[in-house]
Amino acid sequence: MTRFESDILAEALEIVKLYPEPRSATIPLCHLAQSIDGYLAKDAIEHIAELTETTPAEVYGTASFYDMIQLHPVGKYVVGVCTNIACMLQGGYELLEEVESTFGAAIGETSADGLFTVEEVECLATCDRAPCLHVNYRYFGLLDSEGVRKLKEDLTTGKIEGEVPNHGVLSRVKRHAPELISMKEIDDLRTQEDKLKADRAAGKGSGNA
Amino acid sequence: MPNEVEKIVLGRRDLPNSHELDVYLNSGGYQGLRKALSVNPEDVVAQVVESNILGRGGAGFEAGRKWSMLKKATRRYLVVNGDESEPATFKDHFLIENDPHQLVEGTIIAAYAIGASRAFIFLRGEFALGLERVQSAINAAYRIGALGRNIFGSDFSLDVVLHPGAGAYICGEETALLESLEGKRGFPRIKPPYFPAVIGLYGEPTIVNNVETVSNLPWIVTHGGSAFKALGGGRSTGTRIFALSGQVRNPGLYELEMVKTSFRDLIFSQELGGGLRDGRSLKAVIPGGVSAPWIAPDQIDLPLGQDEVAHAGSMLGSGSIIAMDDTTCMVRAAWRISRFFMRESCGQCTPCREGSSWIEKVMARIEGGAGREEDLDLLMDLCDNIVPGVSWPPAQTTICVLGPSIPSSVAVGIRMFRDEFLTHIKEGGCPFD
């Protein structure tokens, strides 16, 4: 992408408005950029900096801290295999090997057909279904080699296209709510409430503070 | 034999489509908030103080006491911590996906109690489905008048904003979470101040509460703090969700009255964990997330209570319990945990950044068969450099508690399974391969 445009730009501006300080929108906007490109492109970094009133260096500094923000192009599907302790006890490393060979990509690499990028990830909080993995952050547990083979088939043939969305975990998250109450209005409301509270406390005495 | 009896937060677990609003409303949903709004905020605080609910995130601080520490200021924030990333902890993930309305209702109750200017629900970025469902629950709350101006016809007005993380264990630490929410790297803040209740989000007083803690609030407000306190024992009141994993027959979530059940019951009772698979025997238990020192099979009659586990030299932490059977290589287990800390250290403090990476390298060397006998002393020395005396609870030598959590598994692994470490070294490889 070059910059956020049309509907996506409108969504980006809505996100910025959710926060008292625009910089807070940095990570949500990185997710938004990834829903278009799969990774955080240089132009996106610059546009996010404008929208959050920061610098590209600050956006990059934040983005590069987080595992989910991709700084290089990835395949259509990012497959993250958990090898942390609960999965390891149930064959997480064996699952990782299976995924590397079945999907045709080593850790950190993308398959020749451009479909799959394989990652080794930390605990996905799905430990009752260990060993598990995610595909674009949709979770699949209790996987054996047959399960991995079938998963690849389903992804390749588009059978679970609806179940596993495109990149960007916010792609299906839409806020439908009235405009936020302004911080000024809230400050006034809370000041009034605090005064009532203080009056009640004074009326009751200080016995049960 | 203690079963799962009292259901407080997992009450809708068996209801189909428990994430949908009508199911929620038909099962008592939003009664807690209505009741809360019918009394003064300080009365809600009093009920939560009375319940003595300990924070369910890991540190186990009394939630009511935390609220009472909120510094007076016009503007203050509530942030719900849904960044669940402690390995083998999967309770919040379940609550977020399967009872999002309960989470949102609890959030509004907490915000009312502390008079929050705005509430943020910070969810782990990896929880894609959870993000969808919590946003839908927030949207529904606005639709039915539970959010926005004059909630349910009262004078109270509030907005709740959902915020996604982006993959960093350290953001579960509350000050790192606030940095992340401000759009920065997840660097924990220097203490003091020890609590965001003094200086938090955007420099304003902020309460950070865990998802499970907040999800308990509708029940506590509806039934009263004393009803909650009547469950459990000692300081560990109410029920708690225990996340059981490892080589047990029935891994999963169990909501149990605190203290009334032991680790043995949880792991071996037919109604609960069902024992180990294939008739294997128990080798060790991780009692509260990988930051906690392991406990031995002869310690499993300990009750599932916060102080009880602390007195035995470990911690109940995030309530995740990993049972490891006799086919488990303990060197590999300790190595994998040290690798986790190495990857997740934010890098600010030298003992944590360097210590975790050195420990991981030496552990990998032993597991890989190139270890030396003096490596065991070297490991203990490295542990001692992070936590002087390798004591428990650990000394605080770094900005946050990630650093002092690093030595737990390695040090206790060497103490409990020294022979197994030595076998790796003498045989030049892992005897379990």
Image: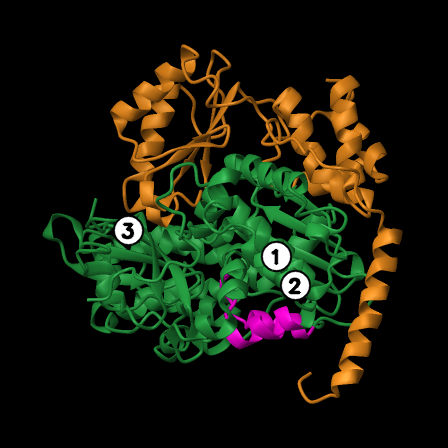
Chain colours: A orange, B green
Q: Which residue is mark 2?
A: B38
> Which disc is residue B202 wearing?
none
Q: Residues within 10 Å of mark 1 (few under 14, many from 20)?
A: many
Residue name at image x 68 percent, y 74 percent = B69
Frontmost of labels 3 and 2 is 2
Q: Secondary structure at mark 1?
A: helix
The amino acid at mark 3 is Gly
Chain bearing tag 3 is B
- Give the magenta-colored segment's residue range: B43-69
Residue name at image x 84 percent, y 40 percent = A54
Observer able to see residue B258: yes
Asked whether B165 falls inside the magenta stretch, the response is: no
Question: Depth check: B121 or A117 in front?
Answer: B121
The amino acid at mark 1 is Arg
- Is circle 2 on the same chain as circle 1? yes
Residue B262 falls left or right of residue B63: left
> Which disc is residue B246 wearing?
3
- The CA span between labels 2 and 1 is 6 Å
> Which disc is residue B34 wearing?
1
Chain bearing tag 2 is B
Mark 3 vs 2, N-terminal side = 2
